[in-house]
């Protein structure tokens, strides 16, 4: 039988908190494994890849997908073990204090400490409950906006009344030929400034309406027309479309916490109770990012980075009680010496080329 490979820390979740925790674990010379449910890293940033992110200190505003690329490159600096397409179903702990991460495939992962960085749970977009809708998901029915450019000059119907739906409508208004927004209620529920912007734009808002049927084009591969029902009047509205975007929120699965035999205390149905050190009710189990709840919690991407580094420092102390309890900064970290030399060498060469 193959012996167990035991890591210092297993990080569950590959969003900003998980990615920075992975990088910082390398800074602290820990053997780290990152486990992610989806096929790509980045977490919720992948929901709005072209939206500008402004709240990361010292970084110019950049589209979310660029931030993901930077975080992934940073996380890989110390060559961690990264496991994708893996659903964690529960976490257990044996008498010797080793954690077992159980997965849907039956594969098990072992570590001395765990950092939960799963946000509010596994994110899956709420699907449109229309018979046959799933067949259009490979063509012109979308649950996220990966690229604004693909909608240029198109007739677009957006279904939803929250922040994302309103943001997408505002972003696409100047790019698309025509944008329609359908929402089942009589009042939108996004940020006031974005709603005001929407109301002053050319976007046609169809409140108190909802999608009843999707009409296929003659090729049966794309949606050609959407039929809406008007909930105030007994009539239907037909909209000719090139693209349909659905934003009805996300389903968050919390099977991991609910199924784990270890006593993980919850602060709410979506968050784990902890403290400012990232400690939870289970010794050796830490949390970072949106999953963590404590007094003074900062719910920004910048806060996720702080959570991650703090959790890593506590995991290091848990594994090695004699280790430094202070964070290791890059300017004093020997692990960066060779990398710094390479950067300086490249910078000097670039200057010579410019001259």
Image (spheres, helix red, strand yellow):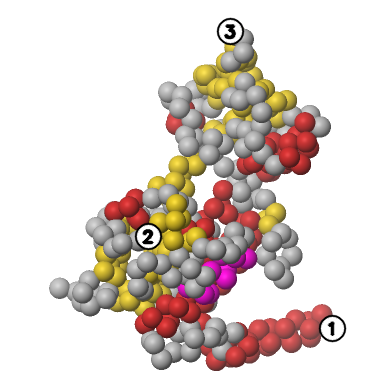
**Residue 39 in sight:** no
For mark 2, give the secondary structure.
Answer: loop
Label 1 vs 2, first from the N-terminus? 2
Q: Which residues are magenta?
A: 302-311
Indicate whether 236 appears above or below 166. above
Side of 159 relative to 219 (left or right): right
Check if residue 19 falls in the magenta segment: no
Q: Quadrant of residue 145?
A: top right
Q: Position of residue 298 (x, y in %)?
A: 60, 62
Label 3 vs 1, first from the N-terminus? 3
- The residue most toward the right is 355
For mark 1, give the secondary structure.
Answer: loop
Identify the residue shown where x is 38% and y is 81%: 318
Identify the residue shown where x is 70% and y is 68%: 57
Q: Quadrant of residue 179?
A: top right
Q: Nearer the viewer, mark 3 or mark 2?
A: 2
Indicate whether 267 appears above or below 219. below
Identify the residue shown where x is 29% and y is 58%: 260
Identify the residue shown where x is 48% and y is 37%: 126
The numbered mark at residue 310 is none
Check if residue 310 falls in the magenta segment: yes
Q: Position of residue 88 (x, y in %)?
A: 34, 57
Structural distance between the alpha carbons of marks 1 and 2 = 61 Å
What residue is pinned by disc 1? 355
What residue is pinned by disc 2? 265
Label 3 vs 2, first from the N-terminus? 3
- Residue 194 or residue 61, whichever sits in front: 194
């Amino acid at each position: 039988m193959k012996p167990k490979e035991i890591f210092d820390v297993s990080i569950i979740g590959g969003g900003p908190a998980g990615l920075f925790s992975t990088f910082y674990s390398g800074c602290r010379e820990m053997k780290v494994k990152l486990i992610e449910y989806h096929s790509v890293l980045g977490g919720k940033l992948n929901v709005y890849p072209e939206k500008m992110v402004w709240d990361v200190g010292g970084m110019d505003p950049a589209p979310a997908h660029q931030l993901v690329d930077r975080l992934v490159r940073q996380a890989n600096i110390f060559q961690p073990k990264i496991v994708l397409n893996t659903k964690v179903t529960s976490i257990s702990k044996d008498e010797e204090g080793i954690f077992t991460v159980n997965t849907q495939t039956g594969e098990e992962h072992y570590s001395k400490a765990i950092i939960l960085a799963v946000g509010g749970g596994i994110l899956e977009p709420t699907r449109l409950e229309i018979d046959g809708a799933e067949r259009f998901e490979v063509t012109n029915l979308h649950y996220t906006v990966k690229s604004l450019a693909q909608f240029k000059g198109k007739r677009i119907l957006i279904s939803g009344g929250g922040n994302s739906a309103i943001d997408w409508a505002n972003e696409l208004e100047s790019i698309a030929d025509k944008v329609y927004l359908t929402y089942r209620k009589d009042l939108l529920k996004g940020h006031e400034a974005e709603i005001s912007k929407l109301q002053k734009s050319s976007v046609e808002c169809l409140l108190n309406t909802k999608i009843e049927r999707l009409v296929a084009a003659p090729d049966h591969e794309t949606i050609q027309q959407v039929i809406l029902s008007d909930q105030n009047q007994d009539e239907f509205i037909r909209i000719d479309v090139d693209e349909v975007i659905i934003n009805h929120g996300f389903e968050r699965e919390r099977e991991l916490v609910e199924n784990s035999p270890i006593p993980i205390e919850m602060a709410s149905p979506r968050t784990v109770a902890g403290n400012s050190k990232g400690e939870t009710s289970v010794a050796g189990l830490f949390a970072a990012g949106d999953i963590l709840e404590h007094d003074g919690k900062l719910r920004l991407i910048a806060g996720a980075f702080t959570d991650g580094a703090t959790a890593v420092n506590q995991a290091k102390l848990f594994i090695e009680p004699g280790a430094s309890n202070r964070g290791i900064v890059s300017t004093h970290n020997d692990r960066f010496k060779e990398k710094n030399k390479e950067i300086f060498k490249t910078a000097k060469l670039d200057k010579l080329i410019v001259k």
